[in-house]
Structures are given as structure tokens and as C-alpha cells.
Image (cartoon, rainbow, N blue to C red):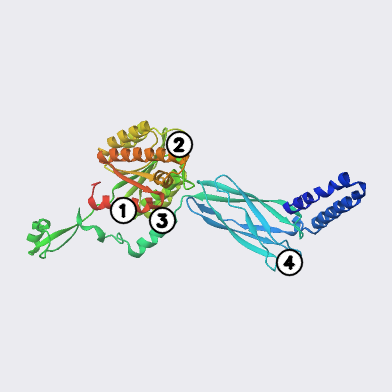
Amino acid sequence: MRPTRRAVLCIAALLPLALLPFVLGPRWLGPWMAALAAIGATLAADALLCRRRSAIAIDVDFPEQLFVGDADPAFVVLRTAPSGAPRAVAVRLEMSERLAAPPTLEVTFAADGVVRTKVELRPRERGAATLREAWLCWSGPLGLIERIARVPLDRQTLIVPDVRAVRQAAIELARRSPWAGKKVERFQGDGSEFAALREFVPGFDPRTIDWKATARHMKLLCRELRAERNHPLVLAFDTGQRMREPIDGVSRLDRAINAALLLGYVALKAEDRVALFAFDATVRSFTPFFSGTAQFERLRRAAAELESATEESNYTLGLTELTRRLSRRSLVVVFTDFGDAIDAELLVENLGRLARRHVVLLVAVRDAELDRIASAAPDTPRTLHQAVAATEMVRDRALVLEKVRRLGVLVLDAPAESVRAGLIDRYLDVQRRELVA
């Protein structure tokens, strides 16, 4: 319990009256003591009328699972007796470091003494998180005294990779899937794998005529082709310390995992085989190749177990080890971020070596805040220095990505909100062009 700002101002207003006995004589001591007693009695009355802690109950509807990279609601419910209810209550929730601290809530009780409000939960990284406690603050009817109460809650939740985009993709693919059934309609006619024989009609490519089948059936038949299936796809994650850096409050690694899981589901749906590889200073994980959408849960669990390290990534060790373990030409999607020129040169060199045997797609999440600083018009010396530094970083990044492209590596450089869609587009383009075959 403590005095409010209003009480402090009231007491401060009595200070000039306290000087009167010293300036005008002892006869003013009585009025000063009476005023002091009046304010003390008022404070005591407000303290007695202030609602007790036991009279206010709090409950938090806390979700059992949260998805990193997105916001989910939790609902706070306060209850008290309608008579004598405080006009407003301030609520502050204390959470573990994996959850961003929500702002303090200012709620007002309804006529029935119940209030229900929503607070957004923004996970920062994967793992177990806890809602530790709630702090409540309310004042008496005169607004002079306020009570502060700590309410232990100890609610647990699990922060996992965001698979809601995967579920939405599953619904869309089930509704209008280009791979529905065993006959892949979307890629017929522009692949190299035999699909069916059909009678030749004017307008078909004469090079597709199957002369042996024509001789057997005594009519002109041609081969219908489709894109090959069962290609290996490797989702390669750099889990070094640079992947710990946040973009809009979510680490680069978590954003990479969210995008990779959507790509993994689409690839499994397309009958390709998907594996997960992770490295930093050493190789952290290399799963077997999964086939079929029934194996997506195993892929998700493997991705959820990845943790970013505090060491620098060893591109030479990681990508060389990946090359050694892959016996067949594969599509390798590398999720990473580079820092200084030395890191960038090592990355370029090893990606070029990997691209000699495999199709490599480099995914680099662009920092929109860095682009904003570089493009903003500076109005102070400080913002000018920031703009110059950001412009140099953006230019160096573009030069590195151009070097990678010249080595035959595909590059996806997009802001965080566009990575998922861009990644699927690049994958489908690789499939249509049959680069892996």
C-alpha cells in the first residue's frame, strides 16, 4: 500500500501552510496541525475503504502452445464484488524471457464486478515459456491510497515453429492440388519421365512420337512426359551466432525454420524426399530423408530441436561435410546470414564448391529496418552516420549475393514476410526446369 500521486500533491499543497507559524507567529500552529490531521484522516479513510487483495480474483486463459513469429491472444479475467469495486485496475504480467513483455493493462470493472480483456503474446524464440505472476494495482475511492498485489500464476506454454502456414497450405493443396492423385497433371508435357501414351494429333511435337508403340498398335502414338519425382531436398540451416539476431523481434533461425517447414511440406506432397541438416562450429544434425506427408511430423520435431549457438559458423566444415554425405544430385536450400567480408568470402567459396555437384538455393532474410535506415533522409549528424553505415552494409550484401549468383547458386533475398512465398516459387521453378534431374 502506498500514497498515489494525488496524495503527494495534496501533502505538497500543505507545505506553504507549514511555514505560517514561523512567519506569522505561533497562533498559526493550530490551523497547520488541523490541516495535517485532516489530510491524515482522509488518507486513513481511503486506505480502509480501498478493496482488499482477497476481494479481487484474477484468472488468465493462457494457451498451451504458441507459434514463434506470430502473436496469439491470452485473456485476463478479473472478478470482485460489484459494491465498492475499484474504478480501475492496472495489470502487469511477468513472463519468462522467451515471451516479449506485454504492456500494462488498464481495465475498468463492469456493473457486475467482472472484466475480461485480451493481451497479445509475442514469442521471441522456441522452447518452454512461463507466465510467472501478475501484478495488480488499484486505488481507493478517493484516489489517495493504492494497493499493489503480487499474484503467482506459474502457467506453462510451449513455443514451437509456426506450422499454421503449413496447415493452410495443406488445405489449399487438398482443395486444388497440382499433385493430387498419382498422375501429376501440372507437370505433364514438360518433363523427362514417361507418363502415358496417347494418340498423336496435329500440333503435338513430332519428337515425342514413339515409333515402336506406333508399329505395335498400328496407329500414330506419342509419349506423354512429366517432371520426375523422388528428388532429394536438403534443408540446410546455419545455426551460428548470427542466426540469433532478431528481425522484428524473431530470430533469423526461427524465421528460417518457419519458411523451411512450409517448403518441406510442399516437397513431401510433391513426392520428393526431404532431409534436414544443421551446422555451426560443427555439424549439429543430419536426419535421414523423409518421404510422404505422413513423415512431416518427424521433420517438424527435428526442426524444433535446433538451437542457435554462440560460436561463429564454420562454412568450410559444414558444407564440405554435407557434400560428402550426399551421394546423389540434390536440391540444397541453405538458410544463413553473413557478417563481415571474411565470413562472406568463406561462404561464397564453399557455396561455389557445393554448386558444382548440386543445385543450391541460398536463402538470406533481408532486414527491412536496415533498408529503412539506408533509404531515410538524414536530418542530424547521428542519422547521417547511421545512413552511411547502413548503405555500406546493404551495398556489401548485394555484392556478395552477386558473386554467389555468378557461381551458379540460386539466391532468394527477400524481407521476412515474403520469404515463404518466394521459397515455394523458387522450388516450383526448379521442379519445372528439372534442374535436379
Real-space Cα separation, disc 1 to disc 2, in angstroms? 29 Å
What type is the residue that disc 1 sits on?
Asp
Real-space Cα separation, disc 4 to disc 1, in angstroms? 58 Å
In this view of the protein, which residue sits in the foreground, 320 or 239? Answer: 239
In this view of the protein, which residue sits in the foreground, 142 or 159? Answer: 142
**C-beta proximity under 8 Å, tags 2 and 3:** no
Real-space Cα separation, disc 4 to disc 2, in angstroms? 54 Å
What type is the residue that disc 3 sits on?
Val
Q: Earlier in the sequence, mark 1 or mark 2?
A: 2
* Residue at image location 81% in from the left, 54% down from the top: 43
| Residue placed under numbered mark 2 in the picture | 241
Q: Earlier in the sequence, mark 4 or mark 2?
A: 4
What type is the residue that disc 2 sits on?
Gln
Which label belongs to residue 425?
Answer: 1
* Residue at image location 66% in from the left, 55% down from the top: 90
The image shows residue 190 at horizontal and vertical percentages of 20, 56
What kind of element bears circle 4? loop
Is residue 136 shown left or right of residue 430?
right
Q: Earlier in the sequence, mark 4 or mark 1?
A: 4
